[in-house]
Amino acid sequence: MLIEIVDKCNVSLDWLAGRSDYTFGLSSMRDFVLFMYELAMKKEIGFEIIVEDKFPNNDIETEENKWTVKLVFYGNDKEHTFNADVCNILKELSDNLFDLESYSITKE
């Protein structure tokens, strides 16, 4: 029964038992899609989705022209109060990506 509860609520058994306060996980594409929809519904965060899938030469993808999708957060967006925080977090992630990839993450 506990497994059914945690699966339906998308939480861990540790969280349900009060052993952890971490509730979020992306273990499948479904989780990712649900996360993106939830993010899009937040009033405090706004972003633009830019799809670049049109190429010269009959829409053929090449090494120079790759299909991409970008999420753009405007840090100075007055309408979405958390955008500046999102931008700062993503900048820090970008600055420290090498550390993340090499598992040399500091405690900070």
Image (tube, grey):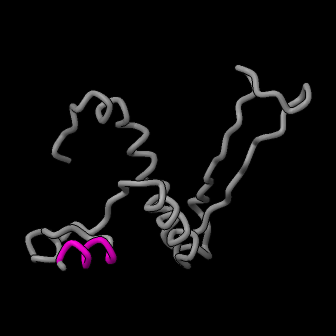
State yes or no: residue 7 in magenta: yes
Q: How many dots with numbers?
A: 0
Using the image, determine if residue 56 lies above or below residue 72: above
Q: Please state the extent of the stretch shown in magenta in the rendering.
A: 2-9
Instruction: Work out whether residue 62 or residue 64 is closer to the camera in this orientation and state it.
Output: 62
The residue positioned 56% from the left and 60% from the top of the image is 75
Residue 85, position in %: x, y? 44, 62
When asked about the image quadrant of residue 15, the answer is: bottom left
Q: Is residue 50 left or right of residue 78?
A: right
Using the image, determine if residue 72 lies above or below residue 96: below
Using the image, determine if residue 32 lies above or below residue 40: above
Magenta residues: mostly which secondary structure?
helix
The residue positioned 35% from the left and 54% from the top of the image is 27
The residue positioned 19% from the left and 39% from the top of the image is 106
Residue 9, position in %: x, y? 32, 77
State yes or no: residue 40 in magenta: no
Residue 69, position in %: x, y? 66, 46
When asked about the image quadrant of residue 96, the answer is: top left
